[in-house]
Amino acid sequence: MFSLTWSQRGLDLVSCGCPSSGGGGGRTRRRSVSRRSAGARCRVSSTQNVDVHSLGPPVGVNPLVSGAGPIQISALLEAVSNDLQQLNKNLKSIIGSENPVLVSAAEQIFGAGGKRLRPALVFLVSRATAQIAGLKELSGQHQRLAEIIEMIHTASLIHDDVLDESEMRRGKETIHQLYGTRVAVLAGDFMFAQSSWYLANLENIEVIKLISQVIKDFASGEIKQASSLFNCDLTLEEYLLKSYYKTASLIAASTKSAAIFSGVSSSLCEQMYEYGKNLGLSFQVVDDILDFTQSAEQLGKPAGSDLAKGNLTAPVIFALEMEPRLRDMIDSEFSEDGSLDTAIHLVNECGGIKRAQDLAKEIADSAIQNLQCLPQCEFRSSLEGMVKYNLERID
């Protein structure tokens, strides 16, 4: 298996092995590379020592294909349904009842139709790795980790909506629309602070460092996005780095932390990190595709809203390579009447969507490869199903 990593030396190609048990991986070979895939230049540099993107499909893994019918997310979560029910109860008690406005804000966002995918991933990885470690039941640390992850995710959504000036979230009014920007910022801050307090009480320095880095990554992602609006020179690699910061970092840290609390080997923990990273990146690319292909009713927000705000995503980056007129429209910030609708049409017509779909599938294949370290069980099946469910959204 070969994967691209970001390190202080730039973009590297790493040969790595996936252990079948607790043993370490194979020998590692590292060299700087530059690659053109479907017209996209793949070269980045960063000071972050984290894996971000994989070249695939990985060796020995068949590309993902659709099954007999669409995957139901409820079926994937059935394996941890009891864990999720307990999580929903605990979240309300964690927020507390000291401030009615904060409670109301929390109920609005927690009850806005979210599927609890991030805590579900924590529970699925926890139970899959607990089997390897011989644990009969999850620990309190596993349970608390899932709650922390959902609180951090919720806080980030509240702040994202303020920064993006979004009016709707999952078909409901956003917190700042209901209660004002001041309350929304404070509600997000409260959840970040509350999650940090519970994180410290887990008393595991490795997990504390992992999750703390996520909160830093959120800010880095927002800064990168804000500084690159309407920038037609944004590269695919810069887009993926921003997507890692804003989406994949939390998922990667949470799946690795779940494995850490199970007490499995460091090599297996790293594979869980890679799974979360690749799943998160694939999810983000798919979300960015849907911004062009779904209706406002399906999205719960106006279609094409990212492009309208100057946030250039994978479909646009690919389309810019093929359609010069698109650059002029973006540079003008869609000042002419109808130019936004024309730009959306061009992104679809010149293959930007198709190439973004290929990218999402390529990253997803790597996520499936990362799960080869786990024994065959219902929890691994659900983790694989998460990857396939994500891709079905763009089939």
Image (tube, rainbow, N blue to C red):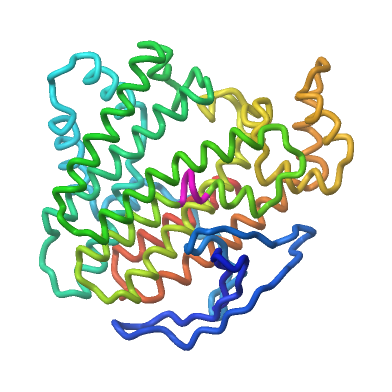
What quarter of the picture does the N terminus occupy?
bottom right
Apparent side of residue 62 relative to residue 37 in the rendered image (left or right): left
Residue 82 in sight: yes
Residue 192 is a magenta residue: no
Residue 64 in sight: no
Residue 13 higher or lower than 354, as above or below = below
Marks counted in the figure total 0
Question: In the image shown, does 353 or 9 lie closer to the viewer?
Answer: 9
- Image x and y of residue 382, in percent: 35, 59
At x 34% / y 53%, what residue is drawn?
76
Question: In the image shown, does 52 or 394 lie closer to the viewer?
Answer: 52
The quadrant in which residue 79 appears is bottom left
- Image x and y of residue 281, in percent: 52, 53
Magenta: main secondary structure equals helix
- Image x and y of residue 210, in percent: 33, 56
Q: Residue furthest bottom?
A: 27
Apparent side of residue 99 relative to residue 158 in the rendered image (left or right): left
Q: Residue furthest right?
A: 324
At x 41% / y 32%, what residue is drawn?
157
- Image x and y of residue 64, in percent: 55, 64
At x 44% / y 46%, what residue is drawn?
217
At x 31% / y 75%, what residue is drawn?
375
Residue 124 higher or lower than 235, as above or below = below
Residue 188 higher or lower than 25, as above or below = above
Apparent side of residue 251 relative to residue 288 in the rendered image (left or right): left
Region of the chain picked out in magenta, as a range: 244-248
